[in-house]
Image (cartoon, helix red, strand yellow):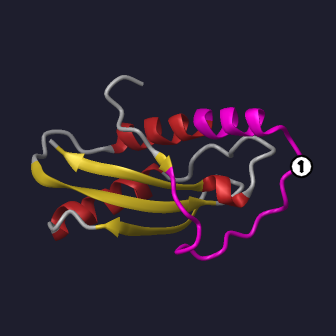
Amino acid sequence: PRNAPAFRLASPAPMPPVEAPSAPSISAETRAAGIRAYGSLVWRRIAERKPKGIHLPGTAYVNFALTGEGAIAAIRIARSSGNPELDAMALRTIESAAPFDPPPSGLAPQDLVFEIPFNFR
């Protein structure tokens, strides 16, 4: 979507393990396309829940992992905005968007770990 900040896959290392069945073998290209499409759906749902009319300086980076059913398995501030109110609002906004649609088949647990920049401008 236009004006949606880019999301990136985050390293799953700092997150608790997500228990999910192992993904069936698919091509790297198909898997990458599935990750991009699912990430866009996740971002759109979060953007729909973002409070309107709030202006806070800074950007919080939120790291979160989803289960194979689309629930939040873990969530944390990966990099603080320096504003506790903005950080808390970013977490609440993502939590309010859950549960997300289940991811496409073939994605592994490490494909369901995201890190997104979050700001209120």
- Residue at horizontal 64%, vertical 41%? 35
The single residue placed furthest to the top in the displayed view is 2
Count of marks overlaid on the render: 1
Magenta span: predominant SS is: loop
User: Judging from the image, what secondary structure is the residue with disc 1 in?
Assistant: loop
Q: How crowded is mark 1: few (under 14 residues within 10 Å), some or many (20 or more)?
A: few
The single residue placed furthest to the right in the displayed view is 25
- Residue at horizontal 13%, vertical 46%? 54
Residue 92 in the magenta stretch? The answer is no
Residue 76 in which image quadrant: bottom left
Q: In which quarter of the image is the N terminus?
A: top left
- Residue at horizontal 76%, vertical 33%? 30
Q: Which amino acid does label 1 sit on?
A: Pro
- Horizontal arrangement in the rendering, residue 70 relative to residue 49 (left or right): right
On the image, the x and y values in percent for residue 62 come to: 38, 60
- Residue at horizontal 16%, vertical 68%? 82
On the image, the x and y values in percent for residue 3 come to: 31, 27
Residue 32 in the magenta stretch? The answer is yes
Viewer-proximal residue, 32 or 86? 32
Residue 103 in which image quadrant: top right
On the image, the x and y values in percent for residue 96 come to: 41, 54
The single residue placed furthest to the front in the displayed view is 28
The answer to whether residue 50 is above or below residue 67 is above
What is the magenta range?
9-37
Residue 47 in which image quadrant: top left
- Horizontal arrangement in the rendering, residue 63 relative to residue 120 (left or right): right
On the image, the x and y values in percent for residue 60 come to: 27, 59
Q: Quadrant of the C terminus?
A: top left
The answer to whether residue 19 is above or below residue 107 is below
- Which residue is under mark 1? 24
Viewer-proximal residue, 79 or 48? 79
Viewer-proximal residue, 96 or 112? 112
